[in-house]
Amino acid sequence: MKSGFKLFSFYFLVFTFPAFLAGCHHNEGGSPATETTDYSQVAIPAFNADSAYRYVAEQVAFGPRTPGSASHTQCGAYLTHRLGSWCDTVVVQPFTTVLWDGSTVKGTNIIGSLNTAATKRILIAAHWDSRMWADHDSDESHHHSPIDGANDGASGVGVILELARCMAQMPPSVGVDFILFDVEDQGTPDWAETRDNDTWCKGSQYWAQHPHQPCYSALYGILFDMVGTQNPRFTKEDISAQYAPTTLDKVWEVAHALGYGNVFVNQKTDPILDDHYYVNQLAGIPTIDIVQNSEGHNFFAHWHTQADNIDCIDSTTLRIVGTVTLKTLYADYPNQ
């Protein structure tokens, strides 16, 4: 995910990138958090942490999910099948893109939808590819080797799969689209001589300009990235705060009300280049990023290293993220 520039001052890019809205405009929807809402009493489907963990492990078991690899093809088929078990429809969106070094790869965005007839919709996303290069590994001999991406990629997808499973059993009164973006994590490696921010997040760039439905609209979006580590710490990242402040405050309010204030920290932090940036800028859908922000590290200690394996994953963290998301959504759109 992203480059070593993720936690840098990103304001220049944010305010100079041209928006592509395809003739559509979206305003942030949903109800703001209120002091009278008792989120502990909001009825939600049961999020199974063991299932979410298993979905992470099953992705990792394929091997590194790098574009063009057999593991990538096999995992893509697995994810399509899983979403197809619970969603009303699944759209497989192939695309071709150019990497930082001029090489061409094929990617596949996977979109599963619940309650397709609903006009009001919520977007929940993560990226499913893993990085080709362990360019942050302390052992330089690993810098050109792919990573498992258990936390950086598979954890967010694992939460989404479990959300799809449990929400299908107790559908909310709103449509939900689960989007698995591909070729997110193949941006310019640290050892390269060039730098180009747009080499990251290729799947979300493509989807934002070619949505799976013409002029697709959602009230808001939530992106998961690196949401499975044993020491979770999520902060109020600045792009999220700029484009989706109502949703950002609502999610953090729910987390605090549920006793997770030590995980969803009420602290504003620097903007991050992630899929939500392009969903906000190009698709015009107000979207927040729930992403690990460890103190003293780029995201977490094993980011873009060979150590980002299944040993990094804690099912309790997956449960916290899933439960907060469900409480946020069902507080406004309960099962009917």
Image: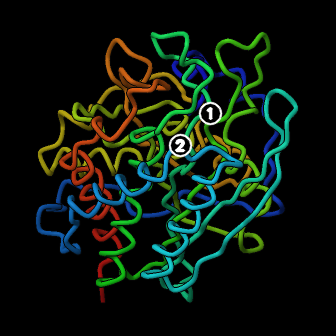
Note whether 139 is above or below 257 in the view shown: above
Q: Label 2 belongs to which residue?
A: 64
Note whether 113 is above or below 190 in the view shown: below
Residues 276 and 106: in front is 106
Residues 245 and 138: in front is 138
Compared across the picture, whether 303 is left or right of 144 comes to: left
Q: Residue 47 appears in which quarter of the rendering?
A: bottom left
* Residue at x 77%, y 73% (from the top left corner): 214
Q: Secondary structure at mark 2?
A: loop
- Residue 268 in view: no
In space, the residues marked 1 and 2 are separated at their CA atoms by 8 Å
User: Disc 1 vs disc 2: Cβ atoms closer than 8 Å?
Assistant: yes
* Residue at x 52%, y 59% (from the top left corner): 220
Residues 258 and 197: in front is 197
| Amino acid residing under circle 1 | Met
10 Å crowding of disc 1: few (<14), some (14-19), many (20+): many
* Residue at x 72%, y 44% (from the top left corner): 202
User: Residue 226, percent across and down?
Assistant: 40, 39
Q: Residue 38 appears in which quarter of the rendering?
A: bottom left
Q: Residue 242 appears in which quarter of the rendering?
A: top right
Tell me the quarter of the image containing the C terminus: bottom left
| Amino acid residing under circle 2 | Pro
Q: Label 1 belongs to which residue?
A: 132
User: Residue 197, percent across and down?
Assistant: 72, 27
10 Å crowding of disc 2: few (<14), some (14-19), many (20+): many
Note whether 131 is above or below 21 in the view shown: above
User: Residue 174, percent across and down?
Assistant: 44, 78
Note whether 253 is above or below 17 in the view shown: below
User: Residue 44, percent across and down?
Assistant: 22, 73
